[in-house]
Amino acid sequence: MNFEYLFFDADNTLWDFNLSEKFALFKVITENQVEYEPIHLEGYHKVNKACWHNFEKGNLSAADLKTKRFELFCHEFGLKLNAEAMGKSYLQHLGSTDFMIAGALNLLDRLSSRHKLVLVTNGIKEVQRRRINNTGIEHYFEAIVISDEIGVAKPNAAFFDHAFEQVSFPAKKDVLMIGDSLSSDIRGGNGYGVATCWYNPAGAAVDPDVVAGFVISELEELVGIV
Ligand SMILES: [Mg+2]
């Protein structure tokens, strides 16, 4: 065994966040009597990405992010709607989802018998806790670390300090960080001095500044690495 501890990102690593997001956005738009169009999702991606970027840099709080992204969204599409209410409704719908990446449950089941699994996710606590419940994955993990619950997010070292504390400070060489985000998962793991595995199912371009030790395009490939 190469890695006793496997730190898993949640969104778009174990959970199909893209599908959950599309579902929640569709619900918010249609319940405001606006006809949903694919361009809404593109516009939302753009403003949401900008907000999360600011959040990861520590320039926007989790609380402000919830409303800000819909303020920007409404501005983008010229909609006169209540951004705060939309932000709340979006999270309600998002938290109701249980979409998983194909093969993820099976993988957790296999890996949890030989490894200690830790869930490390940047996200809003109510939403993440509900989806952990909806997807029935809690029992696979030794610890669950949610950025919103501890006040610090990946890629910050303090986030990883917290996760390490939860599992009694394993040796860094025994830990593999697995995730789809170069900016939070891989940059965070590299910076903390643990091995990293980039889950890149869409074949996104490599970033020479953030190089993962392992790159996989299917979750199943992890079995041969760990
Ligand atoms: Mg992710």
Image (cartoon, helix red, strand yellow):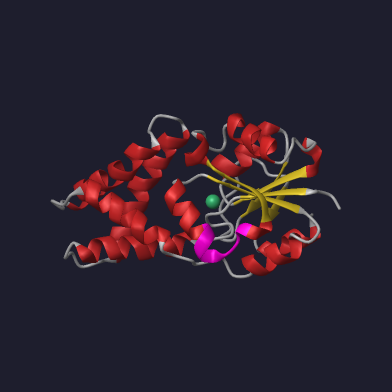
Closer-to-camera residue (154/48): 154
Can residue 43 be seen by looking at this rendering? no
Image quadrant in which the C terminus is located: bottom right
Left or right side of 74 for 116: right
Q: How many marks?
A: 0
Left or right of 82 on screen, residue 208: right
- Determine the residue located farthest toward the left in the rendered image: 80
Up/down of 116 relative to 192, above or below: below
Let me know if residue 136 is in the magenta part: yes
Q: Please state the horizontal and vertical placement of residue 190, each as a whole percent of the image.
A: 67, 36
Residue drawn at (80%, 39%) of the image: 173
Q: Is residue 22 visible?
A: yes
Q: Is residue 25 left or right of residue 215?
A: left
The residue at 78%/61% (across/down) is: 113
Q: Position of residue 74 (x, y in %)?
A: 21, 50
Q: Would you identify the image quadrant in which residue 224 lies?
A: bottom right
Which is more toward the observer, 63 or 213? 63
Q: Residue furthest right?
A: 1
Horizontal and vertical percent for residue 116? Answer: 75, 51
Q: Nearer the viewer, residue 171 or 48?
A: 171
Figure check: 215 above or below 109:
above
The spot of residue 41 in percent (x, y) is 33, 59
Q: Residue at x 25, y 53 (%)?
A: 86
Span colored in magenta: 132-138
Residue 162 on the magenta span: no
Position of 54 compared to 195: left or right?
A: left
From the image, give the main secondary structure of the stretch colored magenta.
helix
- In the rendered view, tell whether residue 159 sits above or below residue 49: above
